[in-house]
Image (tube, grey):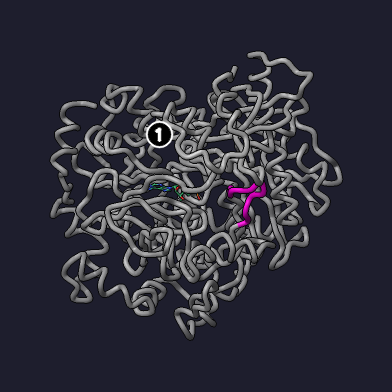
Amino acid sequence: MTKELEALLKEKRIFDPSDDVVNNSNIKRWMNDRGINTYDELLERARDQNWFWGEMGRELEWFEPWNNVLEWNPPHAKWFIGGKFNIVHNALDRHMKTWRKNKVAYIWEGEPGDIRKITYYSLYREVNKFANALKSLGVKKGDKVSIYLPMIPELPIAMLACAKIGAIHSVVFSGFSARAFRQRVNDAGAKIAITVDGFYRRGKVIPLKESADEALKDAPSVEHLIVVRRAGNDIEMDEDRDIWWDELIEGQSVVCDTEIMDSEDMLFILYTSGTTGKPKGVVHVHGGYAVGTHATLKYVFDLKDDDRWWCAADIGWVTGHSYIVYAPLMLGATSIMYEGAPDYPKPDRIWDMVGRHGVTVFYTAPTMIRMFMKYGDKWPKRHDLSSLRLLGSVGEPINPEAWVWYYKKIGRERCPIMDTWWQTETGSFILTPLPITPLKPGSATKPFPSFEADVLNDDGEPITGRGGHLVIKTPWPAMLRTLYKDPERYVRQYWSTFPGVYLTGDVARKDEDGYFWLQGREDDVLNVAGHRIGSAEVESALVSHPKVAEAAVVGKPDPVRGEVIAALVILRSDVNPSPDLKDELRNHVGREIGPIAKPSMIGFVKDLPKTRSGKIMRRIIKAKIKGEPIGDISTLANPEAVAALDEMV
Ligand code: WT7
């Protein structure tokens, strides 16, 4: 650690946002209009959830107003009951009546450097055409559409077209494998799937259509596969099933009615990893999700009409759903959207883009920040980053060292950093600073106004100064409504440990000032480069290989990626360990789940530590891998397994 940083941390310095930032912020104006003077007073007043969210809800357009803001029958919440609404009316249609019609919605940049600027009006027309095209294929309100697209404009267009006509989208990250896509298509029961011929990543073409073909070999619900032309690579088209996107939209009307939805109607399903092998289908709805994401983006990242917002995530994750697609469009903002790798062709691609496009608010993940730190200061130094005024971080705890580097080298000590803690399930930020919040490097600070978060011990008692279960005690508008086709798991997973209280699955500590410090996951879910991967998913991918008998997967701390995957594997008795076999298994996991799930370390062992009920004791494996004391082993059924770990090859 540098001396400077050490001193800084010892000082326990609090970074106060400048008067300029505070006084020009959206939240300060909102407070002034209501006679609220301080941050603490704001948090106090917002405890009246009905009042606070009623105010936020009125910032959007409703076809018919709601009767009640909240109906809470734990663990089921409904928001804006009786309200008639469509998120796409707010994201697109309503801008057609204002000057924003001709404002740029997306500045899209392909990895090879091609640029498309898409105005709200042209986005509106493209969405309408594609919505009509979906209708022509028989897609109706409530039908599911699985979208397997990279970061190209057709991805938001497809999502918005679905939502416009009341269909439900399920976007699957384009880095996932054919098998992962198939599993999600089948769970959703999708009628239509959408993919691309290929896209660019690190200068190469990734032939995604091939994966889609592989996945759809066994996906009986899918009637058609729509294929976007992007890379022009050779692909095979199934005459009965496949349709080119451009041919499908040709001649479609640029006008399409927006379906009048109930505020609680389903908007999308997004699959996320859990502790078991089966991904959870997180369900979000039109009304509350719209109000929650709109309010958090407006007041946390303080977006104004002259901003250029860049959320450098992939739309395949919730970050992109909420903060590249829906919230920025509802705000009428101009967003940057980028297809490729952040360090391609050189480590300054991102800083070059910030400069060229005049980005004002930039939001990324700690793993990226650490990667850029490693490349060195010279890369950002080459660029004019003076347009930036606010920065953001999401996905995992940001270590103070990375926070300070980001603050100094990117924000040049002018830009407050919004460290936003949230999840696929929460839909919107939960713990987050506002531009008026005094910052502590490494802390996600406090709950957004009206949210009640706490840290509980195992007995459910609130604790301060020690790590415990991070929980949310009151419902919020953008919360998940259920798990698709698994309502029992919804109750069990989130609401049963402490009845009526939402269990996040994270460990956190609350300090004497009420600031939250995130410490990571408490279950067997890994956080690799800011994304959740279930250890059970990787284990089941490994044991699906014919040479593997058993596998245990744990997270291993990594200075850049946060956590990397370490796998201990027991081979079948007739198989000999070899370095080649490790590569073979790594690639196998890549094919089964996707490249992000490839174990960085594989060790062959003869035995794995287990409890009497046969559960692998990952705690022991973790301790071994980190070289830490293994602690209490009284519940271990096979103590000899600990010695077997030492003989790992
Ligand atoms: C998990 C949720 C929500 C967008 C990205 C990931 C971790 C997220 C932070 C943060 C510390 C964080 C948590 C959480 N996480 N943001 N600011 N500080 N940890 O969404 O895949 O649903 O993962 O990411 O562990 O539970 P996700």
Quadrant that contains the C terminus = top right
Q: Which residues are magenta?
A: 273-281
Residue at x 31%, y 74% (from the top left corner): 47
Residue 16 visible in the current orientation: yes
Quadrant that contains the N terminus = top left
Q: Quadrant of residue 187?
A: bottom right
Picture mark count = 1
**What residue does disc 1 label?**
368
Residue at x 51%, y 82% (from the top left corner): 64
Residue 110 visible in the current orientation: no
Q: Quadrant of residue 480?
A: bottom right
Q: Is residue 184 left or right of residue 360?
A: right
Q: Quadrant of residue 579?
A: top right
Q: Secondary structure at mark 1?
A: helix
**Front position in the image: 489 or 108:** 489
**Front position in the image: 480 or 648:** 648
Classified by dominant secondary structure, the portion drawn in magenta counts as: loop
Q: Is residue 426 left or right of residue 50?
A: right
